[in-house]
Image (cartoon, rainbow, N blue to C red):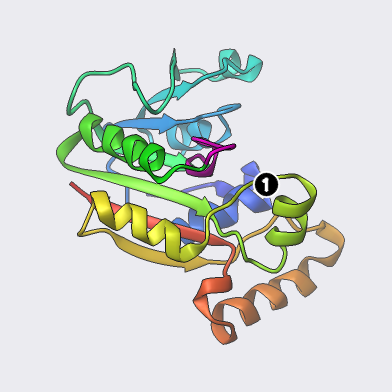
Amino acid sequence: MKLNLSRYGQYKKDIFEKLDFSFVAGQKLLDLGCGDGSDAEIFLNEYKLDVYGVDIYEHENLKKIKGLKFEKGGIFKIPFKDSTFDYVFLHDILHHLDEKGQRKSKHLAGLKELKRVCKKGGTIIIVEGNRYNPLFYPHMVKMLGHNHFRQSYFNEIVLHIFPGAKFKYFEVHLYPKRFISFWKAYEYIMENMIPKCFLSYNLAIIKK
């Protein structure tokens, strides 16, 4: 399948290229915590999937995305029947589930709901920012207040519900265009010379 990811900007292009997952066109995908629909739009236009979005807020931009089926709802009670989706996708959602308390019980409850709505033989894909990445920690955690998980904790809660989960770690950020060569060199160093526990994104691929 020929993709044109460049039109979605450097950050989205990098995320989906490093995701490196072969989706089967026509299958049903849930984008949980879809936000403004920027990921959903890629799934629709580039991967030709049947895309459903769920979020606790209905972003104005969602109305402009042709083909997206949106339902208002949250991860603790996803508004779909058991075994509905071939793919369930989350991008930077887990650390928002219980932002003040960050209770493990809440995180596990959310993961169990993903398992419920995914078909047997389907795939759950979780992309989650890493707390102690050297760029994320001062900017996202300290300045913006995102309570990202430690990589070890992310792995722990995913494996608790999905013992067969496979993990991958990569470095992606939204870089200034003017200095893209510098940042790509930084990215290469991070991915090839620095311990994986400091990379910006944790990826879990779970086959149900």
What residue is shown at x 41% (from left), y 66% (from top)?
168
Residue 159 vs residue 41, the one in the foreground: 159
Residue 97 counted in the magenta span: yes
Residue 66 vs residue 107, the one in the foreground: 107
In the depicted structure, whether residue 195 falls above or below residue 24: below
Residue topped by disc 1:
9
In the depicted structure, whether residue 116 falls above or below residue 22: above
Q: Which quarter of the picture shows residue 51?
A: top left
Work out whether residue 21 can be spotted: no
Identify the main secondary structure in magenta.
loop
Residue 159 counted in the magenta span: no
In the depicted structure, whether residue 130 falls above or below residue 187: above
What residue is shown at x 76% (from left), y 53% (from top)?
142
Q: Judge from the rendering whether residue 207 lies leftward or rightward of residue 148; answer left or right.
A: left
Range of residues picked out in magenta: 93-101
Q: Amino acid at mark 1?
A: Gly
Residue 166 is situated, as x and y percent measured from the top left of the image, at: 29, 63
Q: Judge from the rendering whether residue 98 lies leftward or rightward of residue 188; answer left or right.
A: left
Q: Which quarter of the picture shows residue 60?
A: top right
Q: Residue furthest right?
A: 178
What residue is shown at x 24% (from left), y 38% (from top)?
115
What residue is shown at x 29% (from left), y 38% (from top)?
87
Element carrying mark 1: loop
Work out whether residue 74 can be spotted: yes
